[in-house]
Image: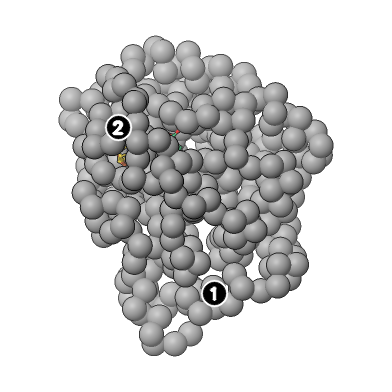
């Protein structure tokens, strides 16, 4: 590793200690001949996971639309005209009824998302009740509510929250092209609050937003060099949404997406790597390659937060063809 590594924010995020990966090392892995890259990723994957098991998470939008942030990809920003109507925070009992259905369909983790810059104090009691209720069902709980301060993170931890999702979304260099209402450093602060409160970190990003290859590599190096690599790394392929600034973004070339998954697996050997948004636009063969490259988790169900997802019939047919079984997990 060389001194110029320290140009990368990931080095700073690593609190002055030696970063685990340099951009140069990561770039060299990303650029390997495809067969060498996938072989290496699959080897690392087998050292840490059952290669024929994939964990199932289910999402629910508990508060949709009307978000004050300006994330260029998002259907829920009040600044874009995506045609989505905004809703209030969902009733706790409705959330729990949806979680029960997801559990019956095989999901082991329930991830609740709100279109907020950050949670308001007046919403915390309901949020806490949702976490406690889903936990009582015996599912792992995850929330994604925007920025959190340490006190909010500690309160969610006390309620029994297992994971908090907060993505860096892209490289530090490309970030200002995508979001201007909160900084990359703000994101790292929230991740630190989540980590310091003892909640597991779920953090990843989006591929296919017009970024360069180097941005995909930098994003993964930042994640791998956090004080601890995220427990869960969702990798989303942009779902282009009409009315957003990225509606016409050039789709990512499938092999480039698979390379991104493989690099994530190699840089973060023990993290769950989730093949997240964008699966409706992927062929079965592309998804099979993503699993071969080390993805070991997906979102199930026919919607994500607001956008379409393949749904149970398609996913069980794909799993049958590939001989993949859903992971059974005990919650702690
Ligand atoms: N409002 C919260 C926040 O941004 O922190 C939580 C919800 S937000 C929708 C969660 C993540 O979903 C984003 O950070 C982004 O990575 C991903 N996402 C949102 N819209 C997407 C799209 N159109 N295509 C792919 N990924 C998307
Ligand atoms: C993540 O990285 N992907 C999920 C989850 N974290 C919250 C969200 C995907 C959202 C896709 C667009 C939508 O449904 O609106
Ligand atoms: Fe709001 Fe989250 Fe969408 Fe950004 S990604 S506009 S913060 S809901």
Residue 294: image quadrant is bottom right
Q: Residue furthest bottom?
A: 2
Residue 283 position in % (x across, y down): 69, 42
Other-residue count near label 2 (Cα within 10 Å), few / some / many at <14 / 14–19 / ≥20 = some
Q: Is residue 197 visible?
A: no
Q: Which mark is residue 81?
A: 2
- Residue drawn 73% across the image and 71% down it: 36
From the viewer's perspective, tell me whether residue 326 is left or right of residue 118. right
Q: At 33% from the left edge and 18% from the top edge, which residue is drawn?
A: 90
Q: Secondary structure at mark 1?
A: helix
Residue under pointer 1: 27
Residue at position x 60%, y 40% in the image: 281
What element does badge 2 sit on? Answer: loop
**Residue 94: mark:** none
In the image, residue 62 sits, relative to residue 176, either above or below, namely: above
| Residue 137 visible in the snapshot | yes
Of residue 93 and residue 294, the one placed in the foreground of this image is: 294
Q: CA distance from mark 2 to mark 1?
A: 37 Å
Quarter assignment of residue 149: top left
Position of residue 286 relative to residue 64, above or below, is: below
Can you tell which quarter of the image residue 15 is in? bottom left
Foreground residue among 190 and 82: 82
Give the image location of residue 313, x and y in percent: 70, 24
Q: Is tag 2's residue or tag 1's residue first in the polypeptide sequence?
A: 1
Image spot of residue 172 (x, y percent): 34, 64
């Amino acid at each position: 590793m060389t001194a110029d590594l320290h140009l990368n924010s990931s080095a700073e995020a690593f609190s002055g200690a030696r970063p685990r990966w340099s951009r140069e090392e990561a770039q060299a892995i990303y650029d390997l001949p495809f067969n060498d890259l996938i072989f290496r990723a699959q080897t690392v994957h087998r050292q840490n996971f059952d290669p024929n098991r994939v964990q199932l998470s289910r999402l629910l939008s508990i508060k949709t639309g009307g978000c004050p942030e300006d994330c260029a990809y998002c259907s829920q920003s009040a600044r874009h005209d995506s045609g989505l109507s905004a809703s209030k925070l969902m009733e706790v009992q409705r959330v729990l009824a949806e979680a029960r259905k997801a559990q019956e369909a095989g999901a082991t983790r329930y991830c609740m998302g709100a279109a907020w810059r950050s949670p308001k104090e007046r919403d915390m009691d309901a949020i806490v009740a949702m976490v406690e209720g889903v936990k009582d069902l015996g599912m792992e709980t995850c929330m994604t509510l925007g920025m959190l301060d340490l006190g909010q993170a500690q309160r969610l931890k006390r309620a029994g929250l297992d994971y908090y999702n907060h993505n860096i979304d892209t490289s530090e260099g490309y970030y200002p092209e995508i979001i201007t209402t909160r900084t990359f450093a703000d994101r790292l602060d929230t991740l630190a609050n989540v980590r310091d409160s003892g909640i597991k970190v779920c953090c990843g990003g989006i591929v296919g937003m017009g970024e360069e290859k180097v941005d995909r590599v930098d994003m993964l190096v930042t994640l791998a060099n956090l004080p601890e690599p995220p427990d869960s790394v969702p990798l989303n392929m942009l779902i282009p949404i009409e009315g957003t600034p990225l509606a016409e973004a050039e789709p990512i070339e499938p092999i480039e997406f698979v390379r991104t998954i493989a690099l994530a697996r190699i840089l973060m050997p023990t993290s769950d790597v989730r093949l997240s948004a964008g699966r409706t636009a992927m062929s079965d063969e592309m998804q099979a390659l993503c699993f071969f490259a080390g993805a070991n988790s997906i979102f199930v169900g026919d919607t994500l937060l607001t956008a379409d997802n393949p749904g149970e019939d398609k996913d069980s047919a794909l799993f049958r063809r590939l001989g993949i079984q859903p992971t059974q997990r005990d919650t702690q």
